[in-house]
Image (cartoon, helix red, strand yellow):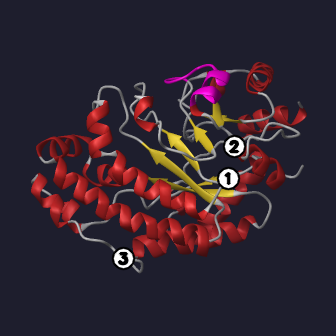
Amino acid sequence: MNKRERVTAAFKGLETDHVAVSMWKHVPPKYWADDDKFAECQVKFLHDTDVDFMKLSGDKFFGWPSQILKEIETADDLKKVHPLGPNHPYIRGQIERTKKVVRALGNECPAIYLIFAPLSYIRLAIGYPKMMQFIRENPEAMKQACHTVAGDVKLLVQGIIQEAGADGIFYSVQNGEENRFTAEEYRDWVMPSDKIVLDYANTLSDMNAIHFCAWEEIPNRLSVWEDYKAPVISWSRYFDIMDIQEAKKHFGCTVWGGFDNRPGTFLYTASKEEIEKEVETLVAQGGKSGYILGSDCSIHDELSEERIRWVVDKAHSI
């Protein structure tokens, strides 16, 4: 199998010749101002690590670029958040840059693009303290803002897949920590806008992945995401479900993960022989259908591409 055949089969839960592997890093800020250099950086990572598919970075385009959010003082101000529209530089900039990355990758491997859930885009603009303050003071105002953002994110997703040529999206849902919201609050305040984007993305591609992010390193209330469907779930093994077979049964689809991504953990400190042995263990646990080998979340800069290559080479030898 080539990379595209292997990854397509993995997303469908079919048996593969080798377990597909994909990890990802953020692109360093020095490349953000130049789309060509940004694309070169992403392609270099592919070639240095030989991962089977690319999670494309959204670096530079994180916090939602609403002037209202930059100046926000009260929860009621959230009602003033207006749509950006399809021609806004925030949306067009991501589409045009992704075109260059996808073109540079050629047909060498599939690529999925990072998309945040609407509440996360708002949180990235105003920070966690204000997000929590405002959503508790006026949940209806926050829900309205999230729905407005969701409408624009749909435009972004459409452009990323249909115009830029990405195979799908990597949908990062956050804010599900057990200590943040009750299940009822999450389902009422957060889920509707999450699902607006996810359900739409699933009409455009059958190669989307949902990332159940353990952003705060606190276990997630996984029950709030039971209705979130995609061919692949990227989950936080070291915070939520350790056993791979249990994760496959729980999520009911292909699961993606295995290594702790945090600095100072095994992937960063173990010898090559130890890492190769761990790959053998993970592949034996996950099997060659319904499992993609990866990490809980983004790999940090201090981890060399060589160490990721150790994982990939070993997985491809089994």
Disc 3 packing (10 Å; few <14; some 14–19; many ≥20): some
Kindly check if marks 1 and 2 are in contact, taking CB atoms under 8 A apart as contact. yes
Quadrant in the rendering for residue 20: top right
| In this picture, residue 229 sits left or right of residue 4 | left
Q: Give the percent coordinates (x, y) of residue 304.
A: 67, 39
Amino acid type of disc 1? Answer: Met
Question: Looking at the image, is 39 positioned above or below residue 250?
Answer: below
Q: Which residue: 79% across, 65% down?
A: 107
Asked if one can make out residue 259 in the rendered structure from this viewpoint, the answer is no
To which residue does mark 1 refer? 54
Q: Is residue 11 visible?
A: yes
Distance from Cα at disc 1 to Cα at disc 2: 7 Å
Q: Which residue bears the numbered disc 3?
A: 85
Q: What stretch is highlighted in magenta?
A: 238-250
Mark 1 nearby-residue class (10 Å; few <14, some 14–19, many ≥20): many
- Between marks 1 and 3, how big is the CA–CA gap? 28 Å
